[in-house]
Amino acid sequence: MAGNFLTKKKAMLDFKLPELDANSKVTWVFHVDDKTDRKTALCDMIIGLDLQTTIGLCANTEDKVIVIPAHTWDL
């Protein structure tokens, strides 16, 4: 989406990123987009900088890799 975006709902989600850490799970509060049709949405969720910073996730766009610390993170 480009421009302004307003959400009125939030949801706490539990999810895993097995490609980054096979054993850890994340619990995080996400803003809910209740305007976009699920069938036409381009993604299921957007991981914002707040969550990326908390888990230490670093997107290296030059090398096209995602780097995460070696320690286990459960949030």
Image (cartoon, grey):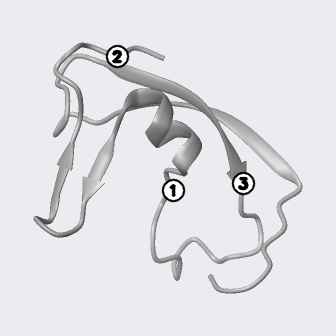
For the point 77% across and 43% down, which residue is it?
A: 10
Q: What element carries label 2?
A: loop
Identified by mark 1, the residue type is Met
For the point 58% across and 41% down, which residue is it?
A: 50
Labels 3 and 1 touching (C-beta < 8 A): no
Identified by mark 3, the residue type is Val
Q: Residues within 10 Å of mark 2 (few under 14, many from 20)?
A: some
When the figure is inspected, residue 21 is found, relative to residue 38, above or below; the finding is above
When the figure is inspected, residue 23 is found, relative to residue 52, above or below; the finding is above
Residue 14 % position (x, y): 50, 27
Q: Which residue lies furthest to the front in this view?
A: 62
Cα distance, mark 3 to mark 1?
A: 9 Å
Mark seen at residue 35: none
Residue denoted by label 3: 32
Residue denoted by label 2: 73
Q: Which of marks 3 and 1 is nearer the N terminus?
A: 3
Q: How crowded is mark 3: few (under 14 residues within 10 Å), some or many (20 or more)?
A: some
Query: Does residue 3 appear to the left or right of 8 in the view shown?
Result: left
For the point 16% across and 40% down, which residue is it?
A: 19
Residue denoted by label 1: 45
Badge nearest the viewer, 1 or 2: 2
Q: Residue furthest right?
A: 8
Residue 40 % position (x, y): 52, 82
Q: What element carries label 1?
A: loop
When the figure is inspected, residue 61 is found, relative to residue 59, above or below; the finding is below
Residue 5 % position (x, y): 78, 73
Badge nearest the viewer, 3 or 2: 2
Residue 54 % position (x, y): 49, 29
